[in-house]
Image (cartoon, grey):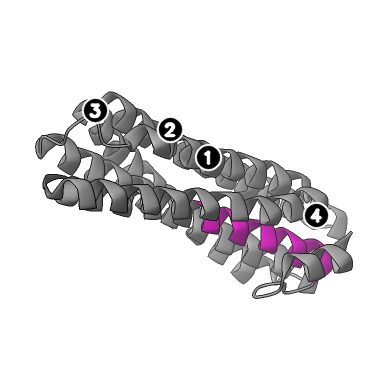
Amino acid sequence: MSDKHLSSQFDSELNGVSTRVMEMGGLVESQIRQAVYALSQFSIEAADQVAAIENRVNAMEVEIDHDLSTIIARRQPTARDLRLLLAFSKATANLERMGDEASRMARMVRSIIEGGAPRSLPSNDLRVAADLASGQLRKALDAFARLDTKMAVAILKEDDLIDKEFDGFVRKLITYMMEDPRTISPSLDLLFLAKAIERIGDHSKNIAELIIYLVKGMDVRHTSVGEIESAVL
């Protein structure tokens, strides 16, 4: 078998894994949207659908990991190709954890609904942070598919916006709990829900850092955005 044919097969296998990672990302994005819808509409049915999607996300993680292990064993990739395969693996792990956070959101929504929480609680205030997190995931997937370091840096900058939304929401919840102790239990559920949204943003940030590692060969974890921007752009 010619080297050219082997190379063509390898490229096909890499493209297949890349497609699967994007599909998995789309599933996780739908989980997040469904969890936010469940909260805004107080819908247990929508919350239950998040758990159903979670099973598919977990199955895809196992399948992608198996494909990656097979490729590494059969192809013995060079340093750059191995870096790509490792990036696929780490991106998949981050997507699976985002799915876990979306499932956690759905469980909190169910707890809030079944606990008879008043609709006056500021649950809709989470929509801004949730939309930001969902948007970050979409951008991270697009940047990963294009290996776009400029977009990756933009994602890192936007992460602060989600953190600020979370901090503001926590302050508002504290006010509600101080004014009416009966809201403490559902407010804590909302707090955990907000934390799950923040973590989804953190995982998108991790994928953005992976893109920079893959393209530039630089490990930018625990590095300030300013330093990353100077080194990458």
Sequence-first disc among 4 and 3? 3
- Mark-to-mark CA distance, 1 and 4: 19 Å
Foreground mark, 1 or 3, reads 3
Q: Read off the residue under disc 4.
A: 149
Which contiguous range is marked in magenta? 201-217
Q: Read off the residue under disc 1.
A: 134
The residue most toward the top is: 41
Front residue (pair 137, 215): 137
> Where's residue 127, x and y in %?
44, 34
Sequence-first disc among 2 and 3? 2
Foreground mark, 1 or 4, reads 1
Sequence-first disc among 1 and 4? 1
> Where's residue 38, x and y in %?
30, 30
Q: Which mark is residue 33?
A: 2
Sequence-first disc among 4 and 2? 2
Sequence-first disc among 1 and 3? 3
Q: Amino acid at mark 1?
A: Ser
Q: Amino acid at mark 2?
A: Arg
Let me know if residue 204 is in the magenta part: yes
